[in-house]
Amino acid sequence: MNLSSRGLVGLFLKIISEPRSLASRLWFAGVVLAGAFGLRYGLSLSLRELAPFLFQLPAIIVVTLISGARVGFGAVVALALANAALLPSHAWSNLASGLGAPADGGFGAVAGLFSFTVNALGLWLIGSLIRISVRRLNATHGALLAAVAEQNSVVATLEALLQHAPVGFAFFDRQLRFIRVNETLARMVGIPAGEHVGRSLADMLPQLSGAITPGLEQVRATGAVLADVEVEGATPAAPGVWRHFLVSFFPVRTQGEAIGLVGMIVTEITGRKTAEKALAESEQRYRLLAEALPKMVWTATPDGKGDYYNHRWSEYTGVTPPAGEVSEWHTHLHPEDQAAALDEWKGSLESGKPYSRECRFRAGDGSYRWFLCRAVPVRDDDGRIDRWYGSCTDISEIVAAREALARTNEDLERLASARTMELARANALLKQEMEDRLKAEAQLRQAQKMEAVGQLTGGIAHDFNNLLTVIIGNLEAAERRVPRDDTNKDATDIRRFLDYGRQGALRAATLTQQLLAFSRRQPLDPRPTDINKLITGMSDMLRSALGEKVTVETVLAGGLWCAEIDHNQLENAILNLGVNGRDAMPAGGTLTIETANAYLDEAYCAAHEDLEPGQYVAIFVCDTGSGMAEEVRARAFEPFFTTKGPREGTGLGLSQVYGFVKQSGGHVMIYSAPGEGTTVKLYLPRHPDDVAGEPVGPDADHAPHTGAARVLLVEDDAALRALSTKALRDAGHTVVEAADAASALATLESGAVPDLLLTDLRLGTDAQRMDGRHLADEVRRRLTTVRVLFTAAYAKNAASENGRLDHGVRLLTKPFTQAELVTKVKDVLEAPGHRGTVLLVEDEPFVAMVARQILEDHGFEVTVASHGHAALAHAEASVPDLSRNALVLAVVDVGLPDMNGDEVVRRLGAIAPGLPVIIATGYGTQELEAEFGASPRIALMGKPYDGATLRNGLRKLGFNIESE
């Protein structure tokens, strides 16, 4: 019930009982108290004197009722304190001076305040009790309403259940007269529900009364429930139709536990009875059919236990079980078939799949015949297996025929198998041949593509670079002739235009070199290179080039092999890869350069073109950038392919790296995935122990040449020849020109003796003419002291196979400036000549590094051996070689890991009797002096030693070493 519907009182009670937040209750209390306090001081003086607390006491009870006991108590305290604070100051002083003193009415004011406080507390207590009572009353009222609602809901539910139940309900009084019938029962019997009330069962259902009345009387007499009584007969709804019902009786007791009513529940089962009758007839027909079949037929429960076998089982097995029992089919199985047949039967029971298997059953005479056993499940409406139906068919004749056919087929299969194997081998060979052919065709197409690009670039490189050299040289000459006068605007503009032209020519030359690198036709100058040292030296340059956002880390392997590579081109390749990594990390990241020794086996090399198995020095350049998709990675090495925008790149960076590494005899691979960064792996060939160098001759033949020199210039391009001649003559050199090899040799025959042969490697286009390399060999044969400088446009003209220069060959790549030409000629003339190979036998790496650097600075090639046996093996291999890598000196440390150095020196004397040897020892030279001091080919040197000590040892053995 809604309290607000009871008028103002109900509304007030509702306001008191409703729950509120503390903030709202405090707000309400504050408003009421402020209003009461304001009214007190807002009235006239006379009223304030007569009733000072007139409005505050009602405010106390209102706040307590609405905001609660705690807030009301707080209001009492607040008002008491506020009124006390507003008393005149002399009231308290008078009270302190003597209670009851009448001065200025101080005692009366204090007494009034005390009276107010007592009254306020009393009103607060009354309000609190009223509030608690109202809230309890409201809670009780709510509970009562909920109980009534719940009772009404139960009654409504029972009424709905009675009226709409799918079964019939009827209730009888103690005289067994109808007092209530639901609509379901009324429809069953065909009589409206209202007509049943007050009438007996015999009046309404005479054909069913005889079967139902005894049950009603039994329940009325005993009070026991009587369930599932089958009743059959006709009803007024269909008088000529015999129907079946299932009736249950139950008592309805009053509060005194006396039986007041008898209830009846009626369910029609006519359909079920009809189905059961049909099922019984069907089962009878099935049994008759099963007994008539020539097969052995059986049924089983859902768990696989047999419950029926036809007479064919007894006739075949000779076993007739007692009545009510069966002889399971698997008890007659052949022992060899039992395990497999039962396992498969269990699998069918678990999975519900049909069972089918061939097996042997024992007959009554003990023989066995083959049968095909099958069983299928029959499921109920819910999909559960209700029964298994099985049969066993005699297939002995079929099995015998099949075995005979199988024997014939075995013979045929053996023949077919042999033929199939032959065809399979032939097919495998054909398939392998096709795969090899497709692979070869793919490699051929790639090679043709590379060759086409190489021919295109190589075909134009020579003439194009000659033209660029002429253009650059003339632009430089023009720049020198334009006065540097900042006040002359025309001169400034001309110098700027000439500079633009020179920059364009240099960019064209760079583009040509990139194309030559991809097509593996750039001239290379391979040298023994310490990769770790090269990368360490590049670290600062890389950090500067890649910017602050990119962190450069190096992981350098210890004991790294020496690589045979053009270190300048390798630096360019690493820088190219670093720049690509930086571009893939716009927000910054880490670029890691790692080195390692690697061995590529035959299987790996067979899967990659132009790669030989062996030892390689590996460089891994890894970035943490965005990575590449597979289709981008597959095309990354193609020339002009780029994922950058216009004007951001030519697409020749990676192709240049690819061409350089492949031309160097190495291998390069890219590993990348989107979002996982990119790793480029470079495999560079390991440097062999025998290093090529210049021919060995007297020291005097290799002394550096300083000052002006006689230069024999051989160049078939007239413009370039004239420009180079003028540049060299301006530098103070004497130049003799020749347009081809024949003219150059004629000049030599006329008596000219040049200090330097400067020749283009490609002289003319006639294949019959001598090229620059053969010209240099012929000139060296005639003049052993002459120095040689080659010029070349691309690798096909270079001084060795695959464009890799022979060791000691100097090359100036076209196009070049006049300053580069003059500087290169000066370097060749002033460089010390190669003196031969020194065998340095030293197990301490740092000592070996220092000694090697000193020897190389004086024109020696150095082979380092850390063990005595390795040094002797190298000496034995080098003695028969009289070419440019001949062994001319050995520097041997006494303390070696495997043998003493003096033993190494003795064995070297037996291998190469005339070989000069420097013995380095840290134990003193007295004992060595006794054995080796008298030998002119042996010099002793104490450790530690410096460059001066080593040079003194060289001079003692007859080497012409300048003092430093």
Image (cartoon, rainbow, N blue to C red):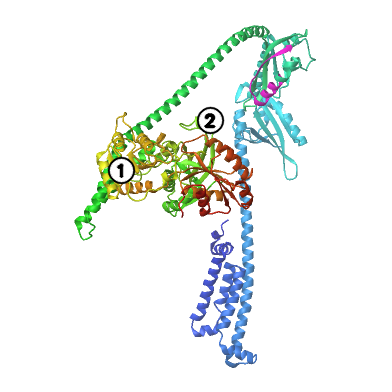
Label 2 amino acid? Ala
Magenta stretch bounds = 341-361
Query: Does residue 348 show up magenta in the picture?
Result: yes
| Tally of numbered tags | 2
Question: What whole-number distance in Å separates the C-alpha atoms at marks 1 and 2?
Answer: 42 Å
Q: Is residue 412 above or below residue 774?
A: above
For the residue pair 806 and 665, the one nearer the viewer reads as 806
Q: Where's residue 415, x and y in %?
A: 58, 9
Label 1 amino acid? Ala
407 sits left or right of 471 in the view: right
821 sits left or right of 117 in the view: left
Location of mark 1 (residue): 508
Q: Where's residue 908, x and y in %?
A: 58, 40
Tell me where residue 88 sits by quadrant.
bottom right
744 sits left or right of 917 in the view: left
Q: Where's residue 182, x and y in %?
A: 62, 35
